[in-house]
Image (tube, grey):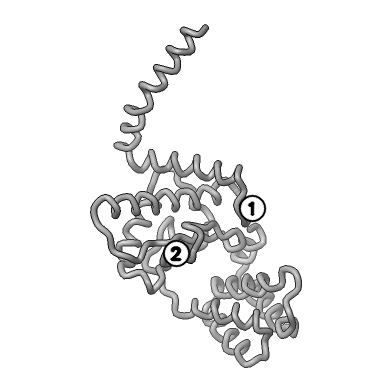
């Protein structure tokens, strides 16, 4: 993450360095170790820094006999040429919504509202991507460690009433959870139990700040239990 942020700070030098690394015969060979992901990170960084040069570099790479795995990476990353953010939050963080989602404006409204919660830490998050939620996806959200980005999913089927309310509540919690990974400085890409628990604590704190009635409801429900537990403890003592 520190290297990514350094790249974004020194744009002119970084663009030259990225183009030099992309102009390598290594991408015609089978990926070794982290080189497969590295190719994608180079392209994503170039896209963030200079979209015109990114387009030219994609065209150049398309004319080279890349290894099939790198070719697939190039195909996926090249789709960013036509990406247009539906909104910006947190002082300029772009929010991208997948074409499969029929109500991008609704998604944008929700993400804007969530991002305004007092104390939410969006510092140095580079982008937020909202993908269509499908059964094949085994996650609801993701903190993109390499790119300091957040990936969310959104239902594509239309529902109403309590199901709609619950899905929006679930999406909001997922957003705060993924921001929590960022705010807590988590550097692991996989599921780490202690980090998941820490991100959940952060998410609950943000949920309660965003929804005061929910906080009052929890107090009303839990406070009698706390009193009962204290009374039982005193009786046992």
Q: Callout 2: helix, strand or loop?
A: loop
**What is the spatial separation of the Cα atoms under label 2 and label 1, in whole angstroms?**
27 Å
The image quadrant that residue 26 belongs to is bottom right
Give the mark nearest the N terminus, 2 or 1.
Answer: 2
Using the image, tell me which numbered label, if any, was put on residue 187. 1
Image quadrant where one finds the N terminus: bottom right
Using the image, tell me which numbered label, if any, was put on residue 135. 2
Residue 3 x/y as whole percent = 67, 61
Nearest the viewer among 228 and 205 is 228
Nearest the viewer among 28 and 93 is 28
The mark closer to the camera, 2 or 1, is 2
Query: What residue is rendered at 58% in x and 63% in y?
Result: 147
Nearest the viewer among 232 and 26 is 232
Q: Callout 1: helix, strand or loop?
A: loop
- Few, some or many residues within 10 Å of mark 1 (<14, 14–19, 20+): some
Query: What residue is rendered at 41% in x and 74% in y?
Result: 84
- Few, some or many residues within 10 Å of mark 2 (<14, 14–19, 20+): few
The image quadrant that residue 5 belongs to is bottom right
Above or below, 194 against 164 in this view is above
Query: What residue is rendered at 70% in x and 80% in y?
Result: 20
Left-right relation of 115 to 76: left
């Amino acid at each position: 993450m520190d290297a990514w942020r350094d790249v974004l700070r020194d744009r002119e030098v970084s663009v030259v360095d990225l183009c030099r690394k992309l102009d390598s015969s290594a991408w015609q060979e089978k990926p070794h170790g982290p080189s497969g992901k590295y190719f994608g990170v180079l392209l994503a960084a170039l896209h963030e820094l200079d979209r015109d040069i990114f387009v030219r570099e994609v065209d150049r790479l398309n004319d080279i006999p890349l290894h099939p795995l790198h070719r697939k990476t190039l195909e996926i990353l090249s789709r960013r040429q036509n990406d247009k953010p539906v909104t910006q939050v947190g002082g300029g963080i772009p929010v991208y919504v997948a074409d499969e989602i029929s109500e991008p404006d609704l998604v944008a409204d929700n993400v804007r509202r969530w991002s305004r919660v007092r104390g939410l830490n969006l510092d140095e998050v580079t982008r937020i991507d909202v993908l269509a939620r499908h059964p094949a996806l085994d996650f609801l959200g993701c903190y993109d460690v390499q790119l300091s980005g957040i990936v969310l999913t959104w239902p594509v089927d239309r529902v109403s009433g309590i199901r709609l309310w619950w899905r929006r509540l679930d999406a909001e919690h997922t957003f705060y959870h993924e921001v929590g990974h960022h705010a807590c400085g988590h550097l692991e890409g996989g599921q780490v139990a202690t980090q998941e628990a820490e991100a959940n604590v952060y998410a609950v704190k943000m949920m309660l700040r965003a929804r005061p009635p929910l906080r009052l409801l929890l107090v009303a429900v839990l406070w009698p239990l706390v009193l009962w537990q204290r009374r039982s403890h005193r009786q046992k003592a």
